[in-house]
Amino acid sequence: SRVALQDVSFAAAAGEVLAIIGPNGAGKTTLLSLLAGIRAPDAGTVLTPAGAPSRLGWVPQQAAVYGKLTVAENLRLFARLEGVGDVEAVVERMLEQTDLRDRAGDELSTLSGGNRQRVNIAVGLLADPPGLLLDEPSASLDPRQRERLWEFISGLARTGTTVVFSTHDVAEADRYADRLLVLADGELLYTGPPSDLIGAHGAAAGEAGDFEGAFVRFL
């Protein structure tokens, strides 16, 4: 009986990095699940350049990969499940793109959290999707791992991949997103660049550069 999302509508351009932020229970993961085609909406439509949500890459918060398989074995398995044409060529491309070639033969369980998340993202990219959806991609990573991960994600955006991610780290959204979607109680309260939110709700308190303070006051 509870409405999870109500009248949430937006468009994202090729190469755009879009952050979904908001308090717990706002509907962030639900929105990503609908975009990914994992859940069916009761109303509304998801349109992608490829014509179906299943063509978007999906990276859940919990890594959906196998610890007892090597990096290459994980990529090979998921490439077959995706039905890609040339499995070995795709695996080689992803090892190169994620800078994990030297770890290709290592069991996933032996990798750092940052490298495991890279493999998790690589799985979402195997079918070369036009857009990538990430649910809190940097959760549980240390600052150095987080920096390397965002270098990789930003590189994807520069080559034309649309990136939509959720995060509880509002400073991360401010730093890396071109545009924000602010959700609360299933409603879209704000869409626009981080700088506009800071300008409207930060300067009034004399904290024009404090994005987190501006965000809290906005809510």
Image (cartoon, grey):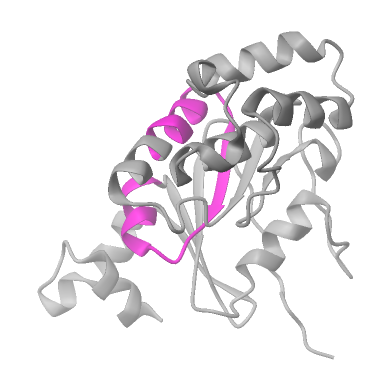
For this rendering, which residue is in front, 55 or 45? 55
Residue 139 percent across, percent down from the top left: 46, 58
Q: Residue at x 53, y 16 (%)?
A: 101
Give the magenta-colored segment's residue range. Answer: 150-176
Q: Residue at x 54, y 14 (%)?
A: 96
Quadrant that contains the N terminus? bottom right
Q: Is residue 117 above or below residue 210?
A: above
Task: Please tell me in which quadrant of the rendered image residue 42 appears.
Answer: bottom right
Q: Is residue 73 visible?
A: yes
For this rendering, which residue is in front, 19 or 70? 70
Position of residue 200 in the picture relative to residue 170 (left or right): left
Position of residue 102 in the picture relative to residue 211 (left or right): right
Residue 80 percent across, percent down from the top left: 86, 25
For this rendering, which residue is in front, 111 or 64? 111
Residue 44 percent across, percent down from the top left: 84, 62
Task: Please tell me in which quadrant of the rendered image residue 123 appears.
Answer: top right
Q: Residue at x 49, y 16 (%)?
A: 102
Q: Residue at x 52, y 24 (%)?
A: 98
Residue 69 percent across, percent down from the top left: 70, 34
Q: Is residue 13 visible?
A: no
Q: Is residue 163 magenta?
A: yes
Q: Is residue 106 above or below residue 38?
A: above
